[in-house]
Image (cartoon, grey):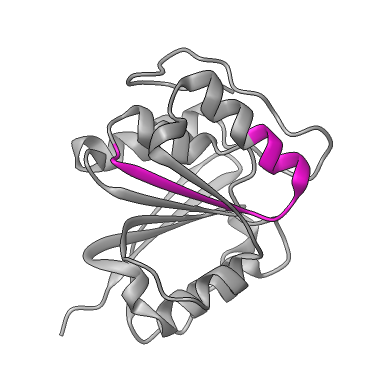
Amino acid sequence: MRVIAGKAKGRKLYAVPGPGTRPMTDRAKSALFSILGDDVRATRFLDLFAGTGQVGIEALSRGAARAVFVEFHHAALRVIHNNLALTGLAEQAEVVRDDVFHYLAVPSQPFDYIYVAPPQYRGLWIQTLQMLDALPGWLTDDGWVIAQIHPVEYAPVALNNLILFDQRKYGSVLLCFYSLRTT
């Protein structure tokens, strides 16, 4: 697991010990950031269920102005802090120890990208989407919510404010892209 491009390119990141996290493959991460392209520059990036922090760190390395990492587990929080120090990107980051649903219940400034990569097979990605759908102020008008799940987890989700506009599969990683519904 490493930073693929940008200021911290090539830095190997620490992993969370044990089976609790599922780091994104370099192939899927590279594809995601190819899709985002230069649009990630100067954006606000929210990394929910942050794990190692590698996706938010990649966004910062590629020029995102700010990234907020929300994680509950102590071991993962320690790894996020270590990875931010290792990459020299800590000044642009905020690490929040909180349950994602508790965190989302308190309004904040909107984000350009919200990345959702919860533990697998628990339906947490659907719950998170439904909460973001009910609180669309978390997303800028042209922002995206990106859910990372295993392809077998996918199910259509009834949403009022968000709409699925793209899906990409990379082996055992399915990326689902949502934006605000335009009227």
Q: Is residue 149 visible?
A: no
Camera-side residue: 146 or 49? 49
**Residue found at the far right of this picture:** 18
- 32 left or right of 183? right
Q: Is residue 32 above or below residue 118?
A: above
Expressed as whole percent of the image width and height from the top left, the position of residue 84 reads: 52, 29
**Residue found at the far front of this picture:** 91
Query: How many badges with numbers are in the image?
Result: 0
Expressed as whole percent of the image width and height from the top left, the position of residue 141 reads: 20, 69
Confirm whether the magenta stretch covers residue 69. Answer: yes
Expressed as whole percent of the image width and height from the top left, the position of residue 30 reads: 41, 30
Residue drawn at x 57%, y 16% as measured from the top left: 12
Expressed as whole percent of the image width and height from the top left, the position of residue 20 reads: 78, 45
Residue drawn at x 44%, y 75% as measured from the top left: 132
Q: Looking at the rendering, which quadrant does residue 67 occupy?
A: top left
Q: Looking at the rendering, which quadrant does residue 25 occupy?
A: top right
What quarter of the picture does the C terminus occupy? bottom left
- 82 left or right of 55? right
Q: Which stretch appears magenta?
A: 64-79
Q: Looking at the rendering, which quadrant does residue 119 occupy?
A: bottom right
Q: Is residue 129 above or below residue 73?
A: below
Q: Is residue 95 visible?
A: yes
**Residue found at the far left of this picture:** 183
**Residue found at the far top of this picture:** 10
- 75 left or right of 154? right
What quarter of the picture does the N terminus occupy? top right
Residue drawn at x 56%, y 39% as measured from the top left: 53
